[in-house]
Image (cartoon, rainbow, N blue to C red):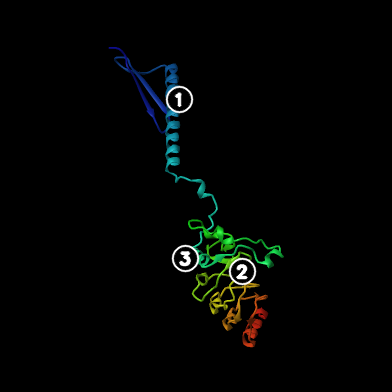
Amino acid sequence: MDPSVYVLLNNHFGILIALRDSGLTWQPISILHVSLLITIITNMSCLLIFYQLLCLLLFCLSSQPTLSSSSFAPSATPLCSHNEASALMKFKSSFSIKQTAPGECKDTSTPSYPKTDSWKEGIDCCSWDGVTCDNKTGQVIGLDLCCSWLYGVIPSNSSLFHLPHLQNLNLAYNDFNGSKMSSEFAQFTSLMQLNLTGSVFAGQIPLQISHLSKLVSLDLSWNYPQALDERTLAGLVQNLTEE
């Protein structure tokens, strides 16, 4: 019977045992044959281990969560709220636009044009002309409509008073048609700057304005005829001089 070769590989220690059947007795095969077999099997084992490691690496990579470019991008500035955008649009629609700029605007370096023309539905109101929003909350904190050619009145139910977070309000050099200044301006409890210069308000300045405890700048000049009683004046002076 033809001799057969039996090979046993110990995976833990890499020991190769090889015997040849001589018919009557078991004898070790030649050292050359053993070395050749060890080399072949060792190379195959290395390739197998490499392949297993490669598969393991690919599996680990595929199991990781996908990282998009947005994962590393800074947080986008929040959009203004729907309620505040709606309030601004209603405020805009309550006025007509004068055909010419007030003379005072022509005599200053203040840009003079209808800022509310840029106010469009479907566009973030924080990008509208004259509107400033808080970078973290998106709340409207500033409204600068100086020299915006507005003509109309600001009644006590105006949607302007639906902007509770306003800190700066500039309505200077618009034409509010000799209307009385509403006491609702006192709702802006966070207001620090209020400019109503040359805005054609008339009548008594409401006492409630003196309740704006955070107010540091108030300009009511060039409004005739407009009256300020002593009590209101005293309250304003107290607020403006407090540290």
Disc nearest the viewer among 1 and 3 = 3
Rendered-image quadrant of the C terminus? bottom right
Q: Is residue 204 left or right of residue 63?
A: right
- Residue 217 visible, this orientation: no
Q: For residue 229, which quarter of the picture?
A: bottom right
Rate crowding at label 3 as few (under 14), some (14 to 19) or many (20 or more) other CA atoms within 10 Å: few
Mark 2, residue position: 174
The answer to whether 125 is drawn above or below residue 67 in the figure is: below
Mark 3, residue position: 83
Q: For residue 166, which quarter of the picture?
A: bottom right
The answer to whether 7 is drawn above or below residue 219 in the figure is: above
SS of the residue at dot 1?
Answer: helix
Which amino acid is tagged 3?
A: Asn
Mark 1, residue position: 43
Rendered-image quadrant of the N terminus? top left
Q: CA distance from mark 1 to mark 3?
A: 73 Å
SS of the residue at dot 3?
Answer: helix
